[in-house]
Amino acid sequence: MFVTIEGTEGSGKSSVVAEVVKLLEKDGEIIVRTREPGGTPIAEEIRNVILDKKNTAMDSMTEALLYAASRRQHLVEKVWPLSKEGKIVISDRFLDSSLAYQGGARGLGIDKILALNQYATDGFYPDLTLLFDLDPRIGLARIAANNNREVNRLDLEKIEFHDQVRQTFLDLAKRFSDRYVVLDASKPFEEVVQDAYKAIKDKLAKCK
Ligand code: TYD
């Protein structure tokens, strides 16, 4: 099973997923966590180019192509082989981030970015996508308050950009309602953990 975790900046997805993984492991599941852009050495090198704050001249389509290239490498080297072994692979961000950030907020168009990604991934989709929905104002304030979290090139975008990312994710959740579960990330941490855990357990029960 392939689960992807999506949301705007500072929505708490990584910390919540760390707790959910512990619960799933207690249930005897074998989980592999990974992230995009990155997840393998080549894909992490591409990540460094994309997120480098120096690269202010990067064209939006170049950005979209680099995300898709890093995704392809991540799938080939990691996600596909591990899924074949029957492991549950959980990726912090995947395809829908490209649709929301490059397709929606950068204005390249959802269908154009979807087509590009279908080409890059041979039409591969996650089994389950958890959307951590939160007002980006709250998320960005959390990042500003957290010294351990490095600020990247996309965090530096204007608030309107992040609002557009959030809205596009919500639109995608409607369009791909068969694989999306929307979580209210403004709830207390423990409740979000339980909501995310339940969504994965429900999907596992259906897949088995
Ligand atoms: P990261 O530091 O991993 O951020 P986060 O903790 O919010 O996941 O940086 C990833 C950034 O890249 C984030 O701003 C979202 C963006 N992104 C895209 O714009 N398109 C994509 O396809 C992906 C995977 C990420």
Image (spheres, grey):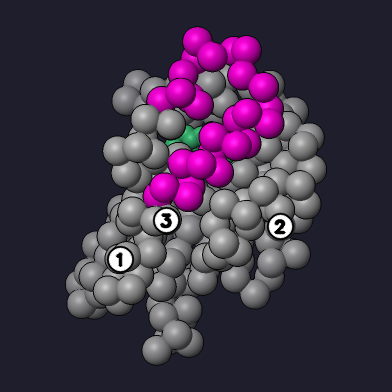
Q: Position of residue 41 (x, y in %)?
A: 30, 38
Task: Identify the mark at residue 75; answer none if there is no mark.
Answer: 3
> In percent of the image, x 35 and y 37: which residue is there?
42
Task: Identify the mark at residue 82; answer none if there is no mark.
Answer: 1
The kind of secondary structure element at disc 2 is helix
Span of residues in magenta: 48-74
The dominant secondary structure in magenta is helix
Q: Residues within 10 Å of mark 1 (few under 14, many from 20)?
A: some
Quadrant for residue 197, please give it: bottom left
Q: Is residue 65 above or below residue 19?
A: above
The disc labelled 1 sits on which kind of residue?
A: Leu
The disc labelled 2 sits on which kind of residue?
A: Leu
Name the quarter where the C terminus is drawn. Answer: bottom left
The kind of secondary structure element at disc 3 is helix
Quadrant for residue 145, please give it: top left
Q: Position of residue 21 (x, y in %)?
A: 29, 62
Alpha carbon of mark 2 to alpha carbon of mark 1: how far?
27 Å
Q: Position of residue 95 (x, y in %)?
A: 57, 52
**Foreground pick, 82 / 137:** 82
Q: Is mark 2 within 8 Å of ligand 1?
A: no
> In percent of the image, x 51 and y 71: which residue is there?
127
On screen, residue 121 versus residue 37, left or right, reads: right
Q: Nearer the viewer, mark 2 or mark 1?
A: 1
Alpha carbon of mark 3 to alpha carbon of mark 1: how far?
10 Å
